[in-house]
Amino acid sequence: MYSDLHNKALTSTRFSELNPPLSDLVLQALSHSGFNFCTPVQAATIPLLCTYKDVIVDAATGSGKTVAFVIPLVEILRRSSSNPKPHQVLGVIISPTRELSSQIYQVAQPFISTLSNGKLMLLVGGVDVKTDMMKIKEEERQPL
Ligand SMILES: Nc1ncnc2c1ncn2[C@@H]1O[C@H](COP(=O)(O)OP(=O)(O)OP(=O)(O)O)[C@@H](O)[C@H]1O
């Protein structure tokens, strides 16, 4: 995955230059992951998603789409002033395969963990739904 990205150009746009600006915690998580410059899909979509636009993207595998939708999700949840109910689901990311779900889980984890009340959970088919429900009930933070 990472080697795929090395074959693609990063833009000259730094995450720290995006408008609206990203929160310090997300910028720290990006820098910690070694991400300083946006890929083209990230530079094009993060500002739109952070201003609540609906966006449909068609871009190559490994072009950075996961970060492009996870960062706005985190930024919008951080801005939200409402107090969620216990176990209220804050967000849902749906993907077509178990492998892709687990890949998204790995990439999203450092960003979701900047939310004090959010907890990223990986729920896949083939597992008893009651077991998943228990996982959500036992978790004190809000599931994503
Ligand atoms: N701005 C960036 N700078 C450096 N590496 C990045 C950047 N954005 C993403 N990456 C890394 O590039 C790889 C591919 O990113 P990602 O999984 O988001 O791509 P994708 O477009 O969602 O791929 P797929 O279509 O397979 O889901 C990951 O290892 C990710 O950590």
Image (cartoon, helix red, strand yellow):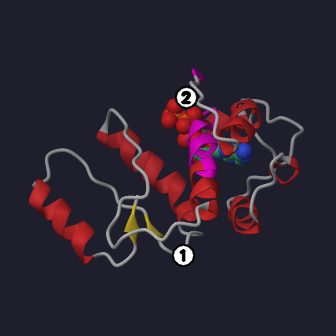
Q: Mark 2 points at which residue?
A: 61
Residue flagged by tag 2: what amino acid is it?
A: Thr
Task: Identify which residue, 74 or 38, lies in the foreground.
Answer: 74
For the residues bearing labels 1 and 2, Cβ distance under 8 angstroms: no
Residue ID at (57%, 64%): 110
Residue ID at (43%, 52%): 91
Q: Mark 1 points at which residue?
A: 116
Q: How far apart are marks 1 and 2 (CA)?
A: 31 Å
Q: In which quarter of the image is the N terminus?
A: top right
Residue 102's x, y, as percent?
A: 38, 49
Q: Is residue 104 visible?
A: yes
Q: Quadrant of the C terminus?
A: bottom left
Residue 106's x, y, as percent?
A: 48, 55
The residue lying furthest to the top in this view is 58
Residue flagged by tag 1: what amino acid is it?
A: Ser
Range covered by the magenta-colored residues: 58-72
Q: In this view, does 125 lie to the left or right of 130?
A: right
Q: Is residue 24 left or right of residue 67?
A: right
Task: Identify which residue, 54 or 36, lies in the foreground.
Answer: 54
Name the mark on residue 74: none
Q: What element carries label 2?
A: loop
Q: In this view, does 85 lie to the left or right of 3?
A: left
When the figure is inspected, residue 27 is found, relative to residue 116, above or below; the finding is above
Location of residue 49 (image quadrant): top right
Q: Is residue 2 visible?
A: no
Task: Identify which residue, 138 or 110, lies in the foreground.
Answer: 138
The magenta stretch spans residue 71: yes
